[in-house]
Image: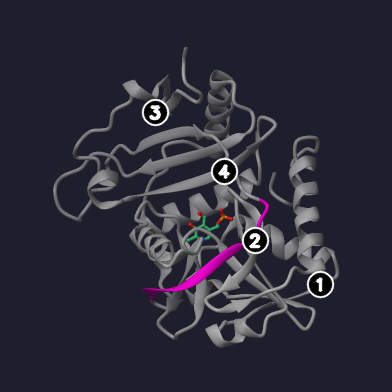
């Protein structure tokens, strides 16, 4: 019997993943020279598709990567893959590298990019709130590379390992000004005095699609929103903290280092609103949330 999600899309073809191969001089493999998107597929449709594409296109412009497919072609290929794998609720990973090239960092711009799409089970996200540690991983404030979803994720890998060694669920990455940016794989928010706060992108933050959705949902719930730098000390006074990602949605944080945080009604409301958006996007045509 075939395993779940055993088919991949690779460079124009749907093939068994065990038959898929990438050349040894692919710059994505050698240098992390590429981009990716991790997308929640709900009832056969990618959630927040347009926003994922906006980020992918922005990233491609920044690194000078010519995307080999338009977003509508990519969507068509993704839908075919979802059908082929018979997998309507899953996580899709789209990876586009600059493709095979000469040794050395320079590129000609004539490389043929490699495009790969794979589907994965949604990880069992426990309902319980998570714990975070403050890692020794640093990014530079204003670093443009933190704003793109590049294939180079060593910072996140190290932050996750740090967190695991501290027996915590994830780790916070700090910028060169000493402020909190995000966790290894999610954006961070906190509520204080009835205001929802999150670090600005320029602090060294990935512009998460779920962050974007959450900011919009908060405004429509009448919650004031502020993008401001977060010194670790500020978090100690938070009324509630949560993290957001396409894979896990909105997750409560129960503890950072020794400080514990209570559950908060406003976070429940945001989670509810998020779930409603997720259900709605399958029934509605494209709308403001980029579905
Ligand atoms: N920050 C980092 C470093 C991430 O890797 C991710 C997602 O993988 C996020 C934030 C959340 O982004 P999104 O909501 O687009 O999944």
Q: Residues within 10 Å of mark 3 (few under 14, many from 20)?
A: many
Q: Are marks 1 and 4 in contact (CB under 8 Å)?
A: no
Residue 188 placement (x, y as % from top left): 59, 68
Question: Number of numbered discs present?
Answer: 4
Gap in Å between the C-alphas at discs 1 and 3?
43 Å
Farthest top residue in view = 1
| Residue where numbered disc 2 is placed | 129
| Residue where numbered disc 4 is placed | 39
What residue range appears in magenta? 127-139
Q: Are marks 1 and 3 in contact (CB under 8 Å)?
A: no
Sequence-first tag of 1 and 2: 2
Q: Quadrant of residue 91?
A: top right
Q: Quadrant of residue 160?
A: bottom left
Residue nearer the viewer, 57 or 117: 117
| Residue where numbered disc 1 is placed | 223
For residue 197: magenta? no
Sequence-first tag of 1 and 4: 4
Residue depicted at x 55% and y 42%:
123
Residue nearer the viewer, 159 or 56: 159
Gap in Å between the C-alphas at discs 2 and 3?
37 Å
Q: Which part of the image, by quadrant, shows the C terminus?
A: top right
Q: Are marks 4 and 2 in contact (CB under 8 Å)?
A: no
Residue 181 placement (x, y as % from top left): 51, 73
């Amino acid at each position: 019997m075939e395993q779940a999600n055993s088919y991949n899309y690779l460079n124009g073809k749907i093939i068994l993943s065990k038959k898929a191969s990438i050349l040894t001089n692919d710059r994505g493999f050698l240098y992390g020279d590429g981009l990716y998107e991790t997308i929640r597929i709900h009832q056969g449709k990618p959630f927040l598709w347009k926003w994922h594409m906006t980020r992918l296109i922005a990233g491609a412009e920044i690194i000078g990567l010519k995307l080999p497919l338009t977003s509508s072609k990519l969507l068509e290929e993704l839908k075919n893959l979802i059908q082929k794998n018979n997998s309507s609720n899953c996580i899709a990973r789209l990876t586009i590298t600059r493709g095979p090239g000469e040794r050395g960092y320079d590129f000609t711009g004539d490389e043929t990019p490699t495009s790969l799409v794979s589907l994965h089970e949604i990880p069992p996200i426990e309902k319980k709130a998570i714990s975070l540690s403050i890692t020794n991983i640093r990014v530079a404030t204003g670093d443009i590379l933190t704003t793109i979803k590049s294939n180079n994720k060593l910072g996140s890998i190290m932050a996750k390992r740090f967190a695991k060694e501290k027996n915590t669920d994830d780790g916070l990455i700090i910028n060169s000004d000493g402020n909190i940016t995000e966790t290894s794989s999610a954006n961070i928010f906190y509520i204080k005095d009835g205001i929802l706060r999150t670090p600005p992108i320029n602090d060294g933050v990935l512009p998460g699609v779920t962050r974007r959705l959450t900011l919009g949902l908060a405004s429509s719930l009448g919650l004031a929103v502020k993008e401001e730098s977060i010194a670790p000390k500020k978090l100690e006074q938070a009324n509630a903290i949560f993290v957001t990602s396409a894979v896990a949605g909105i997750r409560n944080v129960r503890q950072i280092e020794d400080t514990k945080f209570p559950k908060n009604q406003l976070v429940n409301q945001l989670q509810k609103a998020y779930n409603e958006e997720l259900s709605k996007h399958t029934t509605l045509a494209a709308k403001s949330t980029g579905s």
